[in-house]
């Protein structure tokens, strides 16, 4: 049943997307104009927004997620572990529409009045140009990073747990400091698994819809300015699908959905293979110790 | 020389310690901010009316999200009806019969990958399959979309928890001459019922907060739900609509909606944790 469901989803989307693909061909992915009235559909701006916002999210969430996971497995006293990981799990349970609400009314004003002016003054163009409204690629990236943090942290923690205690103790016994032991005997052997954790995080970020729609400003624009409005694949589907009137418009949106599904499936498969192979090799070497 | 080198290493060690500690604290900031915001702003409009009344037109005071709360509950119920039979049976198969086989591996893998598919894509799928064919949005479609999202989640958690049932229990039953299928149905399922409840509750907590797949399956509705073939309001879509609206009163209500949503989601999640704890104690 589950297999059938997965196949059916792919097939239906494929069917739905084909009119648009026939009409636009590969130009769909390389053209910029998105004009439902003129029936011209170029998805490049959405792809750009999706990639950049996810990339920002990753830049922020990867060090934090891995850092917190390390803190929890290696450094934190036992009494802190449970509560901290419980709190991070709560982050994962908050519905994305609540993130979005918080993004509009708390994060975006904060960005507008504190963070953005600072960035404009210190770094400036081309990445941070005024005026800033707070509804921007950067804000979306930050919200996404908070949302994918639990994923990255959870998977990294699982990866760290598979590392046998022995190698850590061996490093310490050789006179390494705590950090050196962690770097050599924990971080290094788990790098494949960590990459998998990060990929799973990206997978979530790419498909995240509601929170992003609410803070990204929803304008299909390609610009290096991170403080400007942008748009993502998921957001345009959410905004236009219910109101799309022409068949070709629906089909174009379905094609975007198919693209999104394809990318996330690919990323998920890659991530899981990476996580598995790391923990499997751990099992093999760790069995004796 | 060595002394200085050693001191450098010590400093680096302390610095990394500090960095990890700071990270853990920083991560708590958005969570705290979010909870405080939702609680403070949400309490402003939280009263009985909010649960019992329909949304009021712009400019009119009062009004609530009664219909949306009911809509969310009914669509989650439909989702359970759609997904539970499939996913629980799949979980039993994986845990009891498929085990490490190649086919079971394939199913597990597909379920994992399916749970990574963005929920909005599921929305498009249901739109194509159901909404487009019958030509209107409906609560049934919304529930179906949520159900599809639930299937891989319930399957995987339930499988893990069925696996926790001690082997000795199964073997004792088989040794007494009870048939395989009977053992599974009567003994294993009975022992794992707490685990199954946990898996279901966790999935329910997750889909109750979904917005994206409902936008163009269940749409929205200003009135009380009149049937599952009608467009249905949901708490999440209502919060979204009100949040991006330019009216102060609506925005206040969006916060209250978010508060109610959080309480619902956390309540169910807490229930899942309790059920899990009880099962684990029982199995020991």
Image: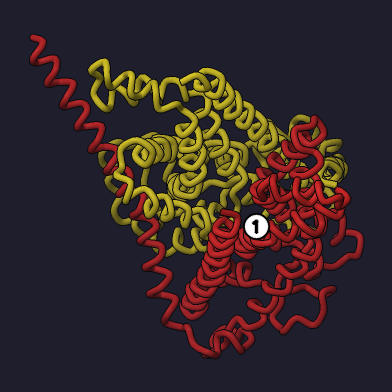
The yellow chain is A
Q: Residue B32, located in which quarter of the rendered image?
A: bottom left
**Nearer to the camera, B190 or B242:** B190
* Residue at 38 percent of width and 74 percent of height: B40
Depth check: B210 or A17 in front?
A: B210
Q: Secondary structure at mark 1?
A: helix
Q: Chain of mark 1?
A: B
**Label 1: few (<14), some or many (≥20) within 10 Å?**
many
Residue under the point 26% across and 27% down: A178
In the rendered image of this protein, does residue B15 appear above or below residue B256?
above
Nearer to the camera, A289 or A110: A289
Give the side of residue A273 with respect to residue B270, left or right.
right
Q: Colour of chain B?
A: red
Q: Which residue has dot 1 on it?
A: B195
The x and y percentages for residue B244 are 54, 66
| Residue A61 pos. (x, y %) | 43, 40
Q: In the image, A80: left or right of A151?
A: left
Colour scheme = by chain
Residue placed at 88% from the left, 42% from the top? Answer: A15
């Amino acid at each position: 049943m589950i297999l059938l469901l997965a196949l059916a989803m792919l097939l239906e989307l494929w069917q739905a997307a084909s009119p648009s693909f026939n009409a636009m061909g590969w130009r769909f992915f390389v053209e910029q104009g998105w004009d439902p009235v003129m029936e011209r559909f170029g998805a490049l701006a959405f792809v750009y927004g999706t990639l950049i916002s996810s990339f920002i999210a990753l830049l922020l969430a990867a060090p934090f997620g891995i850092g917190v996971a390390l803190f929890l497995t290696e450094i934190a006293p036992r009494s802190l572990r449970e509560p901290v990981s419980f709190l991070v799990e709560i982050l994962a349970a908050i519905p994305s529409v609540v993130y979005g609400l918080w993004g509009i009314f708390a994060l975006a004003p904060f960005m507008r009045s504190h963070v953005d002016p600072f960035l404009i003054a210190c770094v400036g163009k081309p990445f941070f140009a005024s005026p800033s409204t707070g509804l921007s690629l950067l804000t979306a990236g930050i919200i996404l990073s908070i949302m994918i943090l639990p994923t990255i942290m959870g998977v990294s923690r699982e990866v760290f747990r598979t590392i046998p205690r022995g190698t850590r103790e061996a490093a310490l016994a050789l006179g390494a400091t705590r950090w050196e032991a962690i770097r050599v005997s924990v971080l290094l052997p788990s790098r494949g698994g960590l990459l998998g954790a990060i990929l799973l995080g990206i997978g979530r970020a790419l498909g995240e819809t509601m929170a992003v729609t609410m803070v990204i400003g929803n304008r299909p624009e390609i610009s290096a300015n991170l403080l400007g409005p942008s748009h993502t694949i998921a957001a345009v589907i959410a905004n236009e699908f219910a109101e799309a009137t022409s068949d070709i418009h629906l089909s174009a949106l379905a094609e975007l959905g198919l693209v999104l599904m394809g990318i996330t499936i690919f990323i998920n498969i890659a991530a899981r293979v990476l996580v598995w192979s790391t923990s499997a090799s751990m099992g093999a070497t760790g069995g004796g110790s | 020389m060595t002394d200085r080198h050693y001191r450098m290493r010590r400093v680096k060690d302390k610095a990394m310690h500090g960095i990890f500690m700071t990270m853990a604290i920083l991560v708590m900031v958005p969570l705290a901010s979010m909870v405080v915001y939702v609680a403070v702003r949400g309490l402003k409009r939280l009263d009985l009316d909010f649960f019992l009344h329909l949304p009021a037109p712009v400019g009119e005071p009062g009004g609530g999200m009664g219909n949306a709360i009911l809509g969310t509950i009914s669509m989650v119920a439909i989702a359970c009806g759609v997904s539970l039979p499939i996913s629980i049976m799949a979980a039993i198969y994986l845990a009891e019969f498929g085990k490490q086989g190649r086919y079971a591996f394939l199913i597990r893998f597909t379920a994992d990958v399916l749970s990574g598919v963005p929920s909005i894509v599921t929305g498009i799928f249901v739109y194509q399959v159901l909404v487009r064919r019958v030509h209107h949005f409906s609560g049934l479609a919304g529930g179906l979309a949520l159900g599809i999202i639930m299937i891989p989640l319930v399957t995987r958690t339930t499988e893990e928890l069925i696996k926790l049932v001690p082997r000795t229990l199964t073997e004792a039953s088989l040794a007494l001459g009870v048939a395989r299928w009977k053992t599974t149905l009567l003994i294993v399922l009975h022992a794992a019922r707490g685990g199954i409840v946990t898996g279901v509750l966790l999935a329910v907590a997750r889909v109750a907060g979904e917005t994206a797949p409902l936008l163009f399956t269940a749409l929205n509705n200003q009135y009380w739900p009149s049937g599952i073939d009608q467009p249905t309001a949901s708490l999440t879509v209502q919060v979204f609509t009100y949040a991006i609206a330019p009216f102060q009163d609506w925005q206040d209500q969006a916060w209250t909606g978010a508060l109610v949503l959080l309480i619902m989601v956390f309540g169910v999640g807490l229930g899942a944790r309790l059920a899990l704890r009880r099962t684990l104690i029982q199995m020991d």
